[in-house]
Amino acid sequence: MNEITNRAWGKFEVLLRKDYTKVKKISVKPGQKLSYQSHSKRDETWVVVDGTLNIIVDEIEYERSYGQSIQIPKGSKHRAINKTNKTAIFIEVQTGDYFGEDDIVRYDI
């Protein structure tokens, strides 16, 4: 599949795409963050597979390191922040009925 998309904060690679799920490998560069956003048509589970991330879900900040995960319910505002000096990598498992990039409401870049 190897769909790799580069962003200013890092990159993501689509590992699996089905009617009922989408799985991405997301790399966040040191000192970078993803936009604060929500989705109306999908839940997400994030599993950190390398490094440490600070993750905000509905205004509450959590720290997750290698092997730890977090659930992000449909409609929850969320973002990943890499406060370290090493690239952090997490796997994002999306479940729901629609996985398009246009199902994103951004609150802060």
Image: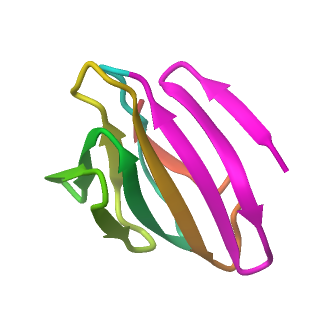
Q: Is residue 62 left or right of residue 86?
A: left
Identify the residue at horizontal 65%, vertical 26% (top origin). 6
Quadrant where the C terminus sits is top left
Q: Nearer the viewer, residue 20 or 42?
A: 20
User: Looking at the picture, how far across and down is residue 11, in whole percent?
Assistant: 59, 31
Identify the residue at horizontal 34%, vertical 53% (top origin). 78
Q: Is residue 64 left or right of residue 106?
A: left
Q: Which residues are magenta?
A: 1-29
Does the magenta run of residues contain 26?
yes
Q: Main secondary structure of the magenta part?
A: strand
Which quadrant would residue 71 be assigned to in this image?
bottom left
User: Looking at the picture, how far across and down is residue 95, in whole percent?
Assistant: 59, 76
Identify the residue at horizontal 44%, vertical 49% (top origin). 90
User: Looking at the picture, how far across and down is residue 5, in whole percent?
Assistant: 70, 33
| Above or below, 30 relative to 82 | above
Which quadrant would residue 80 be assigned to in this image?
top left
| Above or below, 52 relative to 99 | above
Identify the residue at horizontal 42%, vertical 35% (top origin). 34
| Above or below, 75 relative to 11 | below
Can residue 106 be seen in this snapshot? yes
Does the magenta run of residues contain 56?
no
